Amino acid sequence: MKRVARFEKVSFGQFESGFEGENAAAVYEGIKLPRRATTGSAGYDFFAPYAVTLAPGETAKIPTGIRVWIEDGWVLKIYPRSGLGFKYRLQLNNTVGIIDSDYYCSDNEGHIFIKITNDSNEGKTLEIPAGTGFAQGIFVEYGITLDDDAADTRNGGFGSTDKK
């Protein structure tokens, strides 16, 4: 197995700037780094930093407090935990989250936010207790074209690479 990345917490200041609630310091202290549940798991579980309740159709933008250093040539893809998707139709609002290796050096410290929606059509309310896995990230190697000439650098988050 190749070791290609390292999870870290963002600074408290960065977390606090993206957190919309009370007791940011206590929530920050309780943040758990993503980890695999078993040796055969491909996905690293992302844990809810605080309790989240979503009625059908409701959405939440969760500041995870996590950043990740990734070797060049690799990407972190984020998905909902499969059990939550199966039981509640939990979905990421952008379908699959893509965390590029250069996101780590962004002005926001590479802070990973995960926006989820309870898309239940069965009237089920989703409750995610603090510290519970709700999303999973999988590292994937990728290639580039022979004539690739990308030379720009990132300085921002969501949708920043196509802005000049």
Image (cartoon, rainbow, N blue to C red):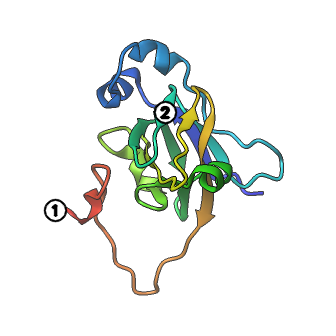
**Closer to the observer: label 1 or label 2?**
2
Task: Give the residue drawn at x 48%, y 78%.
Answer: 144
Q: Position of residue 1 (x, y in %)?
A: 78, 57
Q: Mark 2 falls on what kind of element?
A: strand
Amino acid residing under circle 2? Thr
Q: Mark 1 falls on what kind of element?
A: loop
Task: Give the residue drawn at x 56%, y 71%.
Answer: 142
Above or below — where is 98 with respect to 106? below
Say which residue label 2 marks.
53
Q: Residues within 10 Å of mark 1 (few under 14, many from 20)?
A: few
Front-most of residues 107 and 76: 76
Mark 1 / mark 2, whichever is N-terminal: 2
Identify the mark at residue 164; answer none if there is no mark: 1
Above or below — where is 16 with respect to 36? above
Q: Position of residue 30 (x, y in %)?
A: 56, 19
Q: Is residue 116 left or right of residue 158?
A: right
